[in-house]
Amino acid sequence: MRYPQKGITLQLQEILKKGTSQLRNIAERPLLESEILLSFILQKNRVFLHTHPNLILTNSQIRAIHKLFKRRENGEPIEYITHSVSFMEYFFYITKGALIPRPESEILIEKTKSLILQTNAKNVAEIGVGSGALICSLSLSCPNIQFFGNDISLKALRIATINIKRHSLQKRITLNQSSLLDKIPQNIEIIYSNPPYIQNNIPLPKPVLYEPKEALFGGEMGDEILKQIIFLTHQRKIPYLLCEMGYNQRESIEAYVQQFTPKKITFYQDLAGLERGFIIEFGG
Ligand code: GLN
């Protein structure tokens, strides 16, 4: 990819064309991603790009966009480049060090919200908040609930803290650095989590390699952390647990849960129809 030397000009539409061809092997929607990156550099929205196709870019703008196209071409997720991710109907700050929230986790949030309404719970905890996108979204749609969240990663907690402040949720969300159910208060009625559940050493697509391994890999089988969370939730006598899980983990989780004689366990599917999570009611 060559960019013009000093004195040669490039129009906005030409830059977009270059970006689109440069990103076609890595991005599913290369034009859209080129537009997002260019909007980020110009600090303008995408409508501006469409209404100014002949705008001449400065040399420093061209150099800056070239760098971003290169980073994306090398596999870096666009969310880490632009420091922005959309989840539910909100935008969150994101940077390397926290998992980029996935659309399927919106189902976990919907299910948790329904359970909160149904049980009239007042104290809810998330294990492994990562960027905080899940706990912030849920808190925004459940205004009278007190939320507690933890993570083992200080870097993730720093990102989550930024998002909590951005959405003015400091009074309703308390964070702690801890592992699994450590430091989760006694009065919690519902726990939900999207813990690491991928089998160790499974080869991951290039963009996922930019994400924290401790947020992805769950052990030799993948579901070890899920099982620890089930065990501890039962041990702490917390009545409800909702977790996201891997598409092939239903059988193993279903068998494991039986020893705790739960009142009910239900599994839910993601939008692709794959088994993606479970809800356990432990009962008395
Ligand atoms: N769903 C994520 C992925 O496919 C994994 C998230 C996790 O392990 N909790 O990359």
Image (cartoon, grey):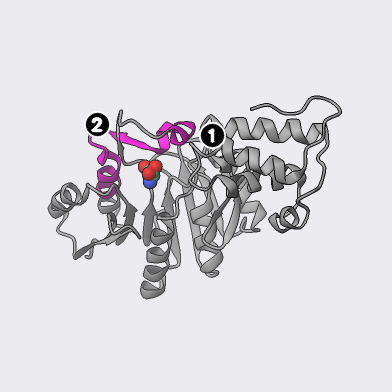
Please state if 64 lies on the left or on the right of 109 as rendered. Answer: right
Binning the other alpha carbons within 10 Å of mark 1 as few (below 14), some (14 to 19) or many (20 upward) gives many
Disc 1: residue Cβ within 8 A of ligand 1's nearest atom: no
Residue 104, given in percent of the width and then of the height, sits at: 40, 55
The stretch drawn in magenta includes residue 218:
yes
Q: Residue at x 39, y 61 (%)?
A: 107
Query: Is label 2 or label 1 in front?
Result: 1
Q: Residue at x 82, y 35 (%)?
A: 9
Q: Is disc 1 placed on a helix, strand or loop?
A: loop
First of labels 2, 1 by sequence position: 1
Q: Residue tagged by mark 1? A: 76
Q: Quadrant of ligand 1?
A: top left
The quarter of the picture where the N terminus appears is: top right
Prevailing SS of the magenta stretch? helix
Residue 221, given in percent of the width and then of the height, sits at: 22, 36
Magenta segment, which residues?
206-232
Seen from the viewer's position, the closer of residues 218 and 24 is: 24
Residue 232, given in percent of the width and then of the height, sits at: 28, 47
Compared with 76, 143 (above or below) is below
Disc 2, disc 1: CB below 8 Å?
Answer: no
Quarter of the figure with residue 111: bottom left
